[in-house]
Image: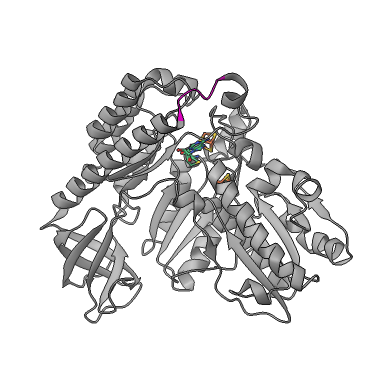
Amino acid sequence: MNKVTDENRQGEAIMTAPVEGTSKKLYLESYGCQMNFADSEIVASILREEGFSTTQNFEEADLIFVNTCAVRDNAEQRVRNRLNEYNRVKRKNPALLIGVLGCMAERLKGKLLEEEKLVDMVVGPDAYRDLPNLIKVAEGGHKAINVILSKEETYADITPVRLDTNGISAFISITRGCDNMCSFCVVPFTRGRERSREPQTIINEAKDLFARGYREVTLIGQNVDSYLWAGGGLKKDTYTSDELKEVTRFDQLLEMVAMTLPQMRVRFSTSHPKDMTDEVLKVMARHKNICKYIHLPVQSGNSRILEKMNRGYTREWYLDRIAAIRKYMPDCGISADIISGFCSETEDEHKDTLSLMEAVGYDFAYMFSYSVRPKTYAERNYPDDVPAEVKNRRLQEIIALQGRLSHESNLKDVGKVFEVLVEGTSKRSDAHFSGRTSQNKVMVFPKGNFKPGDYVQVKVSSCTAATLIGQAVEQEAFA
Ligand code: SAH
Ligand code: SF4
Ligand code: F3S
């Protein structure tokens, strides 16, 4: 579970499963975070209406869309390599249209069309409703671009076409954008202002998923704790007392989803340490179907670096939030994102990150070395002065420590029984199912008579650093 670095998560490409439709073929590839994957499902839905079906082979596509991530430089380099590959196909088939969607489109805007000449269309994350029109422009032989960010768009009324799905778990977008301005981060520039989606549309989407056999939803946003619906969606600084009566906060939304669908597991991501309230923790503790797992990115274990990152909390505040999680849910799984070698980080400050990891005992972590992003506060104001080899060595130390922590965390589970939601056949063995515990750990166990979507009580017999291995002890109804 520890081998997650720059190479994973925000760099993974997932190709889409075929979707029924007619004539024209779309190849859609997605990079980046869960938000991008959820957006690709919106894009597929909009294009299905236009008569596109998806293909898994870009050589036979009429249209290639790559939904991109700009969070670190290596994520962008990977996309550039892919665009070069698509352009080789285009030389043989000039009618092929290539479009860049998502965060890199928003960051680079017209540059992708003018300087780099790699693409026909550039479409930012808030402009997907304009795709049918942009495709027509491109089909007419013109370059097409729409990178206008919106303060309202949530695509709330569009039913996503579920892509690359196991049929059991799905993401539901609850907020878009981010207002936090962490000094290292490009997301506020690529995704725009934070806005929340109307609660009823979220609940309806969850109900629809349940009716179609899904048994787990993850409510997603860059900072779910700042979810706030006040009639209009866009968060304001102050509210009248009448408006406050109508407000829905994240803890309330979470409880509404959990109570509407008691048979559905509910997860969420990402929590922000400065905004995570005890109310959310209490709601989690109250409802069995809300998974006992929190992804709480820390970034650094040192208060000076955290301040420079503009994260809005100190090491002590973060550790207090961890103590609160443990108080309400002693069995809660906890993971984090960590950055090594941020501007001016000293060796002692890096050691603070290691000691914080040890103090929390993370079950899992996503670990990165700092990558300068154009236009961010850090890029404009702080020299990127930790040499690459130092950043990397610190990252390796972080990864090695997390490897030990993940293994220790799994060893503690040996002999215990966990409820596992079966997701599908294990990648390594046809005779085994794979699913996750409430704490988000992957469990592998012999198939027996179970099927995907079942909740199974599984006793852990052994483990690796990444996986729990067990045997079913009984099949119990989820209630
Ligand atoms: N909204 C989430 C994170 C979104 S980006 C949060 O606030 O926690 C996912 C992760 O990428 C971040 O948590 C951070 O660890 C990493 N990241 C973002 N910008 C980065 C950069 N410039 N260099 C290295 N890692 C970065
Ligand atoms: Fe980026 Fe910070 Fe917003 Fe997360 S909270 S998306 S790290 S600016
Ligand atoms: Fe990447 Fe954009 Fe997500 S920059 S991490 S795809 S919001």
Q: Is residue 202 visible?
A: yes
Say which quadrant the C terminus sits in.
Answer: bottom left
* Magenta-span inclusion, residue 120: no
- In this rendering, position of residue 306 left or right of residue 152: left
The residue that appears at 19% across and 64% down in the rendered structure is 469
173 sits left or right of 402 in the view? right
Classify residue 455 by image quadrant.
bottom left
Q: Where is residue 401 in the image (x, y as percent from the top left)?
A: 25, 39
Q: In this view, does 312 lie to the left or right of 300?
A: right
Residue beneath the point at 29% across and 25% down:
351
Of helix, strand and loop, which mostly describes the magenta segment?
loop
Please state the horizontal and vertical placement of residue 474, each as a whole percent of the image. 16, 72
Viewer-nearest residue: 377 or 434: 377
Extreme-left residue of the structure: 415
In depth, the one of 198 and 352 nearer the eye is: 352
Counting labels gives 0
Please tell me which residue is depicted at 25% across the width and 42% down the height of the picture.
329
**Which contiguous range is marked in magenta?**
382-387
